[in-house]
Image (cartoon, helix red, strand yellow):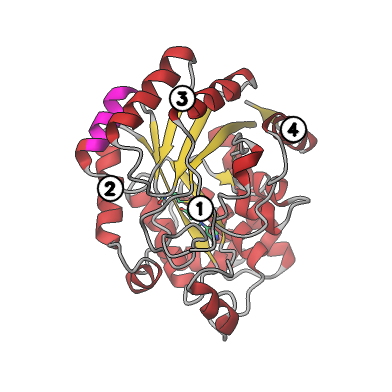
Amino acid sequence: MSLTNDILNKNTLNKSDILHLLNLSEPSELDRLYNKANEVRKQYKGDEVHLRGIIELSNYCARWCTYCGINAGNKQLERYRMPVEEIVITAQKAWELGYKTVVLQSGEDKFYTIDIVEEIIHSIKTTTSLIITLGLGERPEEEFIRMKQAGADRYLLKHETSDKELYKKLHPDMSFENRINCLKVLKKLGFETGSGIMIGIPGQTLESIAEDILLFKELNIDMIGMGPYISHPNTPLHEDFLKLGYFTPDFKVDLEELVYKIIATTRLVNKTAHIPATTALATTNPASGRELALTRGANVVMPNVTDIKYRKLYEIYPAKACINERPEDCRVCIDKRIRSIGRIPA
Ligand code: SAH
């Protein structure tokens, strides 16, 4: 028996097991990892692929995240903010298209006060049976409580990296402790809670990614989103990216393959979690990124249901997948892609 086989047959993986899997490069060993992750996905999550329609409601942001194209410092970006009625209508359209869940995502935009957020949740809940996921960034506990009471079901807040020094560099105006505390509060309040990371950030290491995977488990995260970092030219981190490339200079990685290895390993460690095939991955490989992720541990896809006129402005990174597609076209395209690999759109 090889070490890889021994690890794949273990029920609980430790950090060195995880690092071993993340370092695999031999095609036959990678196949074994992917097959095992696919088996575990089938056993714990079944063949259904869950669809979550994303509404990107505002690209205004008060934060200075150095990798993100909509950060407060990007003066070149045309900003937009969807009015409440339009958000509700977009959610209703998603419901009519057959979505069961919508994700309301935005920059950290103070315009959407807790009163307004409550109003949006009420209006969607009284006119549809949609499950509501929010991704509005960090908020005080009192606001999370009111969102939950208003009927919100889930919250997404990626921790991005567990390397505290790197976190500080990426988020000069934020604290890692507060991010993790928000995740704990969300769990405590009964939200289905999503976290996640970006992969390939200059300065990131495989060791910290192994820690990320263990942190998802420690926090009992319900949904884990992992996608490649895609450098945006109008961001402070772009300069580092041009100098260092993905990861550190002495660490040459095939980023796409690394993302699959991380998704597969995360599935082995977090067997019951939802794992989406992310839009960032579909941007890196538009032809088959989503399909490959879905056969290597992922079980969720998050098609965009935002109106075309806003899509290109929610430019967290350039050339985002499906930027010119209408919501109804996305729905059909994703359905076909899921069926093409023998899976069932839920
Ligand atoms: N303000 C919200 C939503 C942020 S955008 C929040 O803080 O949760 C959603 C996700 O986009 C982020 O969590 C991050 O993981 C991803 N993202 C931002 N910039 C990116 C980039 N350049 N490349 C890849 N992913 C990026």
Mark closest to the chain's N terminus, 2 or 3:
3
- Taking the magenta stretch, the answer to whether it contains residue 287 is no
Give whichever of 260, 97 is nearer the camera: 97
Q: Which tag, 2 or 1, sits closer to the chain's start?
A: 2
Which label sits in the foreground, 4 or 3? Answer: 4
Q: Amino acid at mark 1?
A: Thr
**Closer-to-camera residue (229/214):** 229
Residue at 63% across / 60% down in the picture? 318
Would you name the residue on which mark 3 appears? 131
Quadrant assignment, res 163: bottom left
- Mainly helix, strand or loop, the magenta region? helix
In the structure shown, which secondary structural element does the residue marked by tag 3 occupy? strand
Query: First in sequence: mark 1 or mark 3?
Result: 3
Q: Which residue is mark 4?
A: 329
Residue labelled 2 has its Cβ within 8 Å of some atom of ligand 1: no
State the residue position of label 1.
Answer: 266
Residues in magenta, as a range: 143-151
The span from disc 4 to disc 3 (Cα, nearest Å) is 22 Å
Q: Residue at x 61, y 44 (%)?
A: 311
Would you name the residue on which mark 2 appears?
182
Label 2 amino acid?
Cys
- Determine whether the residue tagged by mark 2 lies in a helix, strand or loop: helix
Toward which corner of the image does residue 276 lie, by quadrant?
A: top right
Q: CA distance from mark 4 to mark 2?
A: 36 Å
